[in-house]
Image (cartoon, rainbow, N blue to C red):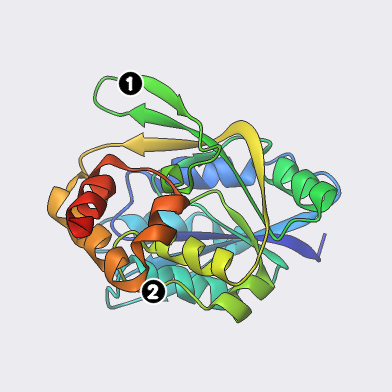
Amino acid sequence: MDEKYFSVIVPVYNGGRFIERALSSAFEQDAAGFGYEVIVINDGSTDNTSEVLSKYGDRIVLVERRQNRGLVYSVNEGIRAASGPYIIRLDADDEFAPDTLYLHREFLEGYGADFSFSDYVNINEWDRTSERVSIRGNYLKMIAIGIAFKREIFDKAGMYDDMFWEEHNFMLKVLAAGFKGVYIPLPLIKYYHHDANMTLNAGNRLAGWQALLQKWDRERLASFGYDPELQQLLQGKGE
């Protein structure tokens, strides 16, 4: 099927030990009746990522970079390369459920929404425990992956800004531009926690919250959702 409904964007940097798991979940989608493409941006990896990706041939649209430019640059590059009317992101160390694309399409079309998002499952790689996370009513519980956006959103709201918590900043821009979303009350993402997660760094998280406070007023952030680290900063700023 030539016409692509979704463009799945997969940025990767030194993700050779994870990327096959992520791509397998992308290729095992229940996508009867519509097509999709998988765009992988290899951001100057120095491990075996290139070797792993070479196995996929023309099953993926591969963007190879010699120089590492960072996650946000890679995601934006993938969006620009996309041909589908809907764009959804999958990180190299996470997984889609088999019906992820199908359900996003059903909810987008059924509700006439501009974007769709779902719950996810946190999986601890150290002890293999897992926990479902519901994001109903709390955008700050969203993660960057597994949100399906109409392409026109990026034309009107702009691309991702190069900052920590780029996903929250982008969603704030999307909502400020008047786009409407639909919530899918099912866990469609497996989000893995391991020693390579950028969010493990408390300094990065704090810098990201502070950057959001510089870009958005505290009332908007408070109504956007709840996070205990951000809440502490909001209370401090209000004193």
Q: Give the residue drawn at x 46%, y 40%.
A: 21
Q: Give the residue drawn at x 56%, y 78%.
A: 80
Kindly report which numbered mark, 1 or 2, lies closer to the viewer in this rendering: 2
Residue type at tag 2: Asp
> Which residue extends farthest front?
239
Residue 138 in view (yes/no)? yes
- Position above or below: 127 against 117: above
Between the C-alphas of marks 1 and 2, the distance is: 33 Å
- Label disc, if present, on residue 128 of the rendered structure: 1
Q: Give the residue drawn at x 81%, y 55%.
A: 112
Nearer to me, 227 or 185: 227
Residue type at tag 1: Arg
Nearer to me, 211 or 150: 211
- Position above or below: 165 against 192: below
- Label disc, if present, on residue 161 of the rendered structure: 2
Instruction: Give the image quarter of residue 175.
Output: bottom right
Q: Secondary structure at mark 1?
A: loop
Name the side, left or right, on which 238 lies relative to 141: left
Q: Secondary structure at mark 2?
A: loop
Can you give x and y, in whole percent of width and height, for residue 12 in the image? Answer: 38, 59
Q: Please state, as top left, top right, bottom left or bottom right, where the C terminus lies in the image.
A: bottom left
Residue 197 in view (yes/no)? no
Chain-order first, disc 1 or disc 2:
1
Disc 1 crowd, CA 10 A, few/some/many (<14, 14-19, 20+): few
Name the side, left or right, on which 78 lies relative to 113: left
Name the side, left or right, on which 162 lies relative to 187: left
Can you give x and y, in whole percent of width and height, for residue 22 in the image? Answer: 48, 44
Nearer to me, 31 or 50: 31
Q: Give the residue drawn at x 46%, y 52%.
A: 224
Instruction: Give the image quarter of residue 127.
Output: top left
How many marks are shown on the rendered structure? 2
- Label disc, if present, on residue 108 of the rendered structure: none
